[in-house]
Image: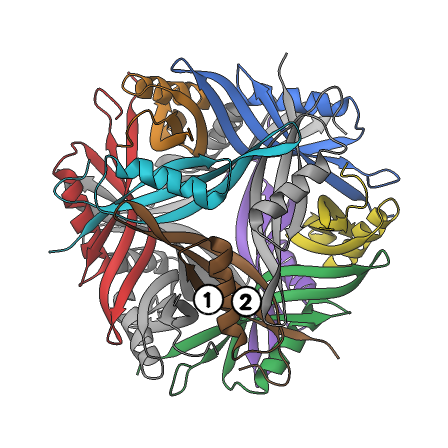
Chain colours: C purple, D blue, E yellow, F orange, H green, I red, J cyan, L brown
Amino acid sequence: MSRVYKKIELVGTSTESFEDAIKVAVERAAKTLKHLLWFEVKELRGAIRDGKVSEFQVVLQVAFRVEEDVE
Amino acid sequence: MSRVYKKIELVGTSTESFEDAIKVAVERAAKTLKHLLWFEVKELRGAIRDGKVSEFQVVLQVAFRVEEDVE
Amino acid sequence: MSRVYKKIELVGTSTESFEDAIKVAVERAAKTLKHLLWFEVKELRGAIRDGKVSEFQVVLQVAFRVEEDVE
Amino acid sequence: MSRVYKKIELVGTSTESFEDAIKVAVERAAKTLKHLLWFEVKELRGAIRDGKVSEFQVVLQVAFRVEEDVE
Amino acid sequence: MSRVYKKIELVGTSTESFEDAIKVAVERAAKTLKHLLWFEVKELRGAIRDGKVSEFQVVLQVAFRVEEDVE
Amino acid sequence: MSRVYKKIELVGTSTESFEDAIKVAVERAAKTLKHLLWFEVKELRGAIRDGKVSEFQVVLQVAFRVEEDVE
Amino acid sequence: MSRVYKKIELVGTSTESFEDAIKVAVERAAKTLKHLLWFEVKELRGAIRDGKVSEFQVVLQVAFRVEEDVE
Amino acid sequence: MSRVYKKIELVGTSTESFEDAIKVAVERAAKTLKHLLWFEVKELRGAIRDGKVSEFQVVLQVAFRVEEDVE
Amino acid sequence: MSRVYKKIELVGTSTESFEDAIKVAVERAAKTLKHLLWFEVKELRGAIRDGKVSEFQVVLQVAFRVEEDVE
Amino acid sequence: MSRVYKKIELVGTSTESFEDAIKVAVERAAKTLKHLLWFEVKELRGAIRDGKVSEFQVVLQVAFRVEEDVE
Amino acid sequence: MSRVYKKIELVGTSTESFEDAIKVAVERAAKTLKHLLWFEVKELRGAIRDGKVSEFQVVLQVAFRVEEDVE
Amino acid sequence: MSRVYKKIELVGTSTESFEDAIKVAVERAAKTLKHLLWFEVKELRGAIRDGKVSEFQVVLQVAFRVEEDVE
């Protein structure tokens, strides 16, 4: 049977690194979605406060296998 | 705690203006989603009927803060 | 009343053709979504096994009319 | 019978708004072309004179159904 | 003498396949244009009706050699 | 003598419209820069508060003629 | 009265340089079109024969002011 | 041990379909490269002769696992 | 009063990481610019020496609020 | 110590060639900026007068090393 | 004599970070290629297993100086 | 039999012009590759020394017909 995947777009944030911001987003997604398989980074951005980087932000797509229904 | 946002992609329509088409989409989204924070325009298009612009269409992403779960 | 549409991003797969991969994704989406209206292809890819194309993959956006709520 | 459409690229201008610049272009196109169906915005630009915006410019594609011939 | 080519943008449609939609557009163009030489696909899209793909659409540029005049 | 232009990138904001956000940015630029000639829109975005659009934002490049020096 | 412009897409060729290929395309266009105003380069390419560049090719859009009719 | 992949860019051609053009390119690549794993389509184009599509062309990247050396 | 922001484009470098290269650029910018608010990554690159990565480079835009004048 | 570079965006013009338009912009920039290191072409355009190319225009980014301050 | 460089496209992987994935690819390339000079990141992606990021993947171009022959 | 082409990515350099930089790259490629057929320009850049353009650089893809093997 042919497989179907769905991609959703999230923004993860971290004060540490882009990798950490991705992990934050992926792990939050994993709370309600099963079969997460891959992610694709769309944008890297961040916030600055008092002349210093205060937050790393990653816009990413997270893809998962659709079991029964596409919602 | 690190925040996570989700972006969904909508198309708003209006006979008046692009701004109005955006408001239509955002307000419809606000009926079922809380914590809407920003939008990003992806495309501007429209329909023509009888040689006149009959509809302005905006493809936009609407972003909101994910409370508990990413669905 | 102004209409609003939502687009979701799917990946369809097929051993036959890109057209077939699109049909697989659209028909799976139609199981849970009403008012599907159009699709837009974002990417064409595929898998190779033993030196031969083993799967065609299409990343596509599927758009549907939002009835009452945007979820 | 399968339909065919043609897209032409125009630039509309207006001192008022982008929407108005689009209407100017579409209505001029409608003088010589029948079956205009939709437009797609490619670029938004404008002119500045004496420190103020003096003109809004929209680069857009206008699409129409090809009746008998593609010229 | 240096050659000059012109490209026009068409949308072909087919209930069968993207290849067929391209053929439809190219053959219609060939009714009024001579010296068609190549095409370039810009977009792949389609319509959905009753939960099934009802039409494949290809936005393509068709290029031809300009004989005497560029019109 | 050959002319040289410089482009700077600004973000204008308005509660009213994208056109107004552009005017806000252009007029602020005109306070310190002479010979402003054109603008190019790079992005359209906005803020949402309490389920309604609260601000339109335009990322734009503003171009001016360089008189003596490029700074 | 608001002005309207039309852009057409041409490919100019030259054995000498990209600038020359542009001149070839523009001058051919000027044979049948009045009010040509500007061009925009979309692509630079070329042909190779016997291990040497044999032709420079420029894909460009040529814009002109629409007098009475958009055709 | 971390894996490394290499991507090469090919153009496959076919008188039948884009899928067939991809198979032609992949199978030719498989003659000299082992561990081919996936492909990504970059461009769809084609040739026209006598007013008909005479060839489908696919620009694609083919990826393979690097065993010992990257060459 | 409507706010206006300006974006400048910098390249930060670091022997450690992309995050560090961003911090280097942002902190240097903060020496002469007040009200820095956010950054957007445009490109990730780097230098290689003796077969090893010797420098991570990030091309980024840094945005700040324009107080009185846009310069 | 980690280096930081700044990029500014200029438009150079010439009646001769794109290369000449770049030189015009770079040399004007060099009047007030030290440590210019490289340029990147963003756009090639030009003006047409009386059916002939009257000016070549190059939109380019010019990069320089930031000594003490980023302004 | 004018220098020529060649760029190849690789995908590096790491369980640690994007920087590490780049190092993995560059160092593998250095086993068979001399004169590696710079890299450019094209894509950031990754794999997810059991709801956690299991691998960071970087698609990058690695450039080297061509000594005698381009192969 | 269906033909297959391969594209490689090179950077040519010249103190004279972009056209010359392309010739340098193509002629170096021709030393080891047969059946070179076309090139596509991907990027135009250059170096600046002492406030003057010191080198024109062209990133280009060079395509050739694959005889027996794809390597």
The quadrant of the image that shows the N terminus of chain J is: bottom left
Answer whether residue C69 is visible to the viewer in this image: no
Residue J17: % across, % down: 50, 43
| Label 2 SS | strand
Residue C18: % across, % down: 66, 64
Do tag 2 and tag 1 residues touch (Cβ < 8 Å)?
yes
Front-lying residue, E32 or F48: E32
Could you tell which of marks 2 and 1 lies nearer the N-terminus? 1
In the picture shown, does residue I34 fall above or below E17?
above
Q: In the picture, residue D40 is in which quadrant?
A: top right
Front-lying residue, H6 or J46: J46
The quadrant of the image that shows the C terminus of chain J is: top left
* Residue drawn at the location 52% of the way across and 63% of the way down: L23
Q: Which residue is mark 1?
A: L10
| Label 1 SS | strand
Q: Is residue L70 left or right of residue E16?
A: left
Task: Please state which amino acid type lies under the numbered disc 1.
Answer: Leu
In the picture shown, does residue J49 fall above or below L28?
above
Residue D65: % across, % down: 79, 37
Q: How many numbered discs?
A: 2
In the picture shown, does residue F61 fall above or below D17?
below
Task: Please state which amino acid type lies under the numbered disc 2.
Answer: Val
In the picture shown, does residue H62 fall above or below D3?
below
* Residue drawn at the location 51% of the way across and 30% of the way down: D44
Front-lying residue, H62 or L35: L35
Q: Which residue is mark 2?
A: L62
Q: CA distance from mark 2 to mark 1?
A: 7 Å
* Residue drawn at the location 51% of the way across and 73% of the way down: L29
* Residue drawn at the location 45% of the way across and 35% of the way down: J13
Circle 2 chain: L
Q: Is residue H21 left or right of residue J36?
A: right
Residues marked 2 and 1, same chain: yes
